[in-house]
Amino acid sequence: MPERSPMPDNPMLDTPMPDAPMPDAAAFATRLLRDEARGLLTRLDQVRPFALHETMVLAAALPYGAHVTIERFLHAARGHLRARVYAYLHWLDGIGSRATAAEQQRRFVLIRLEFNAVLSQFDLFTEVITQRSEHGTGVWLSGLDVLAADALRVDVAGYEPPPVVCYLARGPGAAIRRARTRLPGGRPNPVAIIRVPRERMVGGSVASSLIHEVGHECSAQLGLVESMRRDIAAAARRHPGGRGQGGSWPAWHAWIGEILADCFAVGRLGIAGTVGLLAVVSLPAYFVFRPSGDDPHPVPYLRVLISAGIGEALYPHPQWAALRRAWKDLYPLGELPAERVAQLRRIEADIPELVDLLLSHSPAALGGRRLGDMFDAGRRTPQRLLHLHRQWAGDVGVLARRSPSLVFAVLGQAKAADLISPERESRMLSTLLAAWAVRSSLDVVQNTSRTRAPALQPTGWS
C-alpha cells in the first residue's frame, strides 16, 4: 500500500492559545446578578393567565367574579414584581454599580424571595383551577361553588361575601383558606378557597363539610369568635365551679370556632348537618373519646352531641333525641376510665346552656339580632322540609331552581326519614350539581354580554 503523506503542519496547533482574561471580581459579581435578574423576567413572562392555558367545559368554569378577582390579583403581583426587577436593574447599572457585591446580592435575594412567593400563589390557584378540566369533577366543583356562594349569603347590613371557589383533595376533612388571610409573600387572599375531601363526593354529606367551612368564613367576617369568647368568659365568671381544668367553659372557649362553624352547617341543613358531621368523626373509639388538648376541634363524642343540641334548639323534633341515642349506642362510655366518663358527662350536661348562649348571642355585627335569627329557622323545620320533599316530588327541574342549601336540607331530611335511599340521593345531587353549574355558567355569559369587564393592562404575558 502506498505510504500516506504526512499531515501538513497546522500553524494554529503550534501557536499557544492566549489565556482568557481574568475578569474583575466586582464586575463579575455584578454581571452574574444582572443575568439572574433578567432570567427572573424571562421566567415571569412564562407565568401566563389561566384563561390562556386551562381547558375546561364552560359549565366547569370558576364563578366569573372569582376568576376575574384571581386573575387581577396575580396580574398585580406579577406587575409589581416586574417593576421591582426593572428598578433593580436600573439601580445596578447606575449608582448600584459602585455598591459592594454583598449589598447587590442582598437586594437581589429579596426580589427572588418575592418571585418565589408569586409562584407559590400561582401554584395555589393552579391546584384549584386545574381540576376543572377533569371529566365530571370540574362540573361538580362548579356546582359546589354555587352551593358555597348560596350558604355565604347572610342578611347583615354592610356584609359583603367574598368570592368562593372549591377544589378536591385527599384526606377525611374539609378545610378553608379564608378570604383576606395572608398568602405566601404576605398579600391578602382575594377569594375564599374551600378544600373538599374526595371521599365525600358525591352525596349529601358533602354539604355538611362545605357549609361548615363557609361557617368559618362567615364567623371571621362578622367577628363572631371574638365576641362569643367574651360571652363565654362572662358566663364562666358566673359559674366558678366550671372554670377549672376539665370544666365546660374553658373547653367552650377553646372550641368555639369549630362550634360556630358546626352551627352554620346545622342552621343551613338541619339534620343533614349533624348526620354529615357524624360521618366525618366516626373513627375508632380511642379517637372519638380522646381529649383534644390544643386541637381547636371539640372531642368528637361531644361534638356530635353539641351539633344535635343546636339542631334541637333551632328545629325542635323527636329526631334529635333519637340521633343522640344512636350516637351513644355507637360509642358507649362503659369501657372508659371512670374519671374520663365523669368528665364527659359533666361537659355534656352543660351543652344546653352553651347552645342557649350561642343562639342568643347578639354581636354588634348583627345589629341587635341574635345569632339564631340568621338561619330562618321557621322555613327549615323538619315538617317544612318534608312538606317540600312531597311537593317537589323529586322533579329535578323544580329542585334545580331552588336554593342549593335548601335542596340539600330537604333531601337530607328525606333520607333521615327513610323516604329516599342514599343511592337515589347521590344520583339526584350529581344531576343537580351539574344543573347549577350550567345555570351559573349561562348567567355569566348573559351578564358579561351586557357589561364588559375592564380589561387587564397588557404587559407581556402578565
Image: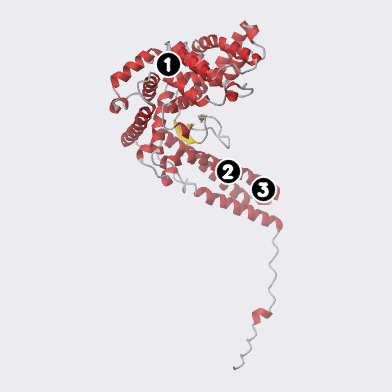
Viewer-side label of 2, 1: 1
Judged from this view, the residue extending furthest toward the top is 238
Mark 2 — residue?
116
Q: Is residue 425 visible?
A: yes
Residue 248 falls in which quadrant of the image?
A: top right
* Labelled disc at residue 375: 1
Counting residues from the start of the chain, the first of labels 2 and 3 encountered is 3
In the depicted structure, whether residue 219 falls above or below residue 136: above
Q: Is residue 156 visible?
A: no
* Disc 1 residue crowd, few under 14, some 14–19, many 20+, Cα 10 Å: some
Question: Residue shown at 67%/45% (left/top)?
Answer: 106
Viewer-side label of 2, 3: 2
Is the N terminus in the top left, top right, bottom left or bottom right quadrant?
bottom right
The alpha-carbon separation of the residues under discs 2 and 3 comes to: 16 Å
Q: Is residue 305 left or right of residue 423?
A: right
Mark 3 — residue?
105
Q: Name the foreground residue: 247 vs 57.
A: 247
Question: Residue shown at 29%/21% (left/top)?
Answer: 392
